[in-house]
Amino acid sequence: MSEHEPDELGSALRVLAADASVPPTLSGGQIRRRGEARGRRRRAAVATTAVVVLGMGAAVGVPWVMDGSKEVRRPVATEAPNPSLTAPVPASAPARIDLRRKVLTFGPAGEKLRSFRLTMRDDVTAGSAKVKYKDPRRKIPVSLSAPPDSGYNIEASWVVELSLPSGEVLYLFADDASGSPMNRSVLRVPAADAGWVYDRLNVGDTVTLK
């Protein structure tokens, strides 16, 4: 608002007050001419007042809307968030394995971030497994009864070791190992996606199997 706007508003209001206080002591023709002149001044004063008020409203970011003889103040509308803006994908997201469909899914319950088809047996144990260990390259036992140093091991990449509450161990790794065993401890991820899965699972994370 400019420094002259308050003076203009005050002048306009003084004109209106002065017009209202003039006594009708003149002739009919003079009164009529005075009345016409007074009407013109009054309209000019009202217009000046409206301009000043609208300028004040714009200065504080609040629009003013003329509604008959009143000025209606309306709040500034809040912009709706852009639907294309989404939260970044967390480095560690909840993971779950659908044992019936044999699908590993990352994302909060009710949402789907990414899903991967697993190669696995039908009798994999259900439960809440913890990520116990991970290694981009390591040997894993061929069978549940073979200890890690028994010689019956295979080289696997992007290995994530899961531990069930019962102590049973599951191995999640890339499906690129020749002669990979098909027992219930093995969960094979497509080779092209195994690195992504490996990066998203951290030691201590929970993987739900059901």
Image (cartoon, helix red, strand yellow):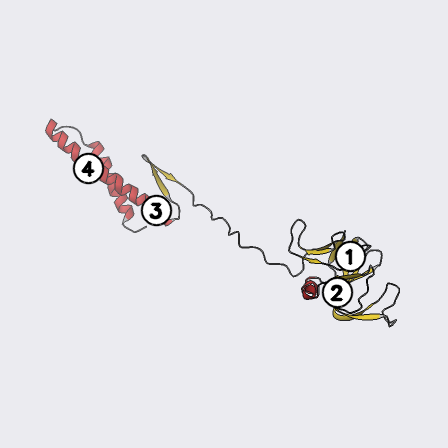
Q: Gap in Å between the C-alphas at discs 3 and 2?
A: 68 Å
| Disc 2 crowd, CA 10 A, few/some/many (<14, 14-19, 20+) | many
**Residue 55 position within the rendered picture, expressed as x and y whole percent measured from the top left:** 32, 47
Residue type indicated by callout 4: Arg
Q: Secondary structure at mark 4?
A: helix
> In the picture provided, is 192 more to the left or to the right than 210?
left
Which mark, by number, is residue 129? 1
143 vs 2, nearest the viewer? 143
Asked if the residues shown at circle 2 and circle 4 are in contact, with their CB atoms under 8 angstroms apart, the answer is no
Between discs 1 and 4, the one toward the N terminus: 4
Instruction: Please give the residue where the numbered disc 4 appears in the rendered image.
Output: 40
Q: Given this view, does label 1 or label 4 mark the residue nearer the observer?
A: 1
Residue type indicated by callout 2: Phe
Residue type indicated by callout 1: Ala
Residue type indicated by callout 3: Met
**Residue 59 position within the rendered picture, expressed as x and y whole percent measured from the top left:** 36, 49
**Residue 197 position within the rendered picture, expressed as x and y whole percent measured from the top left:** 69, 62
Q: Secondary structure at mark 2?
A: strand
Residue depicted at 27% across the width and 43% down the height: 9
Between discs 3 and 2, the one toward the N terminus: 3
Between discs 4 and 3, the one toward the N terminus: 4
Q: Gap in Å between the C-alphas at discs 2 and 4?
A: 89 Å
Between discs 3 and 1, the one toward the N terminus: 3
